[in-house]
Amino acid sequence: MAIVVALIACCSTLAGGLIALRVGTHRQVVLGLAAGVMLGVVGFDLLPEALEAAGQEIFGVPAATLTLVGGFLTLHIIERSLAIHRGQEDRFGAHRHGLESVGLLTASGLVGHSFLDGLGIGLGFQAGPALGLSVAIAVIAHDFADGFNTFTITTLYGNARHRALLLLAMDAVAPVAGAVVGTLIVLPPEVIGLYLGYFAGFLLYLATADILPQAHAGSSSGRTLLATVAGAAFMWLVVGLA
């Protein structure tokens, strides 16, 4: 049952990526929506799960929030070390920074998160059908956003479309692989919680420091702001229903 549900999540991921592929000229609105969805995933899904799973504190601070800050600073240090300044390229003339690696790194993180989604489905069904179904509803709903963000982020950082499609395919297969593993082994929840916190820091940095400035560069519109709010509200709705 866990693997069957994970296959539905696979289709949901592919649907999100294909929609991102066909947005055409509505790039800024789509980026605003992606940022809102990512903020919603961090605030309403990843961070609460990380805090609950990790549990322990280190010197008076929840371990999951320490890894969140660590994830944020990791990407910030990478970008500053490479003198990257997304969203303000027009001020610096014609040049490239090798941003493709940042997009690939982040999309790979989304693949890892999707694997953990599938793992959660497998472990949930081990605990009981009701819990497994509840986890599956949440995973299927937000794997759509994962697919959307995997394609958007990979292409945003200058990668060719075939690379984005390859990572989208990996992201779609990942929850199935995770569900298979989740039916076979049990991982300490603390380890999963620390990973989720770290990855939440990645997404938080991308949403606030990179994607939102891109969404509002040039002729920003009220539709972009509305899309950002709608993306966050959508994830609130998904988490609340799940």
Image (cartoon, rainbow, N blue to C red):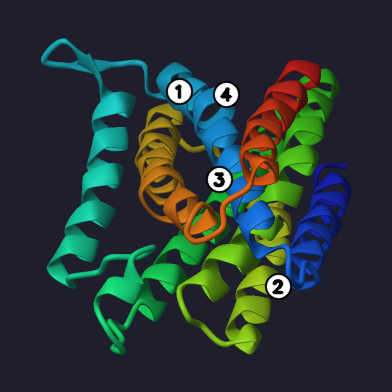
Of residues 4 and 154, the one drawn nearer to the viewer in this rendering: 154
Helix, strand or loop status at disc 3: helix
Q: CA distance from mark 3 to mark 4?
A: 14 Å
Identify residue for label 1.
53
- Give the mark toward the camera: 3 or 2: 3
Asked if disc 4 and disc 2 are in contact, CB closer than 8 Å, the reply is no
Q: State the residue at coordinates (78%, 39%).
A: 141
Toward the viewer: 191 or 160? Answer: 160
Labelled disc at residue 67: none
The tag on residue 35 is: 3
Where's residue 118, x and y in %? 67, 47
Residue 135 seen: no
- Residue mark closest to the camera, 3 vs 1: 3
State which tag comes first along the sequence, 3 or 1. Answer: 3
Report whether 156 appears left or right of 233: left
Q: Which residue is mark 2?
A: 169
Q: In the visual, does 99 lie left or right of 148?
A: left
- Residue flagged by tag 3: what amino acid is it? Ala
Contact check, label 2 and label 1, Cβ < 8 Å: no
Which quadrant of the structure image shows residue 69?
Answer: top left
- For the residues labelled 4 and 2, the Cα–Cα distance comes to 26 Å
Residue shown at 42%/31% (left/top)? 193
Mark closer to the observer (2, 1): 2
Q: Is residue 53 visible?
A: yes
Q: Amino acid at mark 2?
A: Ala
Where is mark 4, residue-wise? 44
In x, y percent, where is residue 1?
88, 42
Q: CA distance from mark 3 to mark 2?
A: 22 Å
On the rendered image, what quadrant is the C terminus found in?
A: top right
User: Exactly how many numbered labels are in the figure?
Assistant: 4
User: Can you say whether 190 is above or below 62 in the image?
Assistant: below
Q: Is residue 113 left or right of residue 102?
A: right
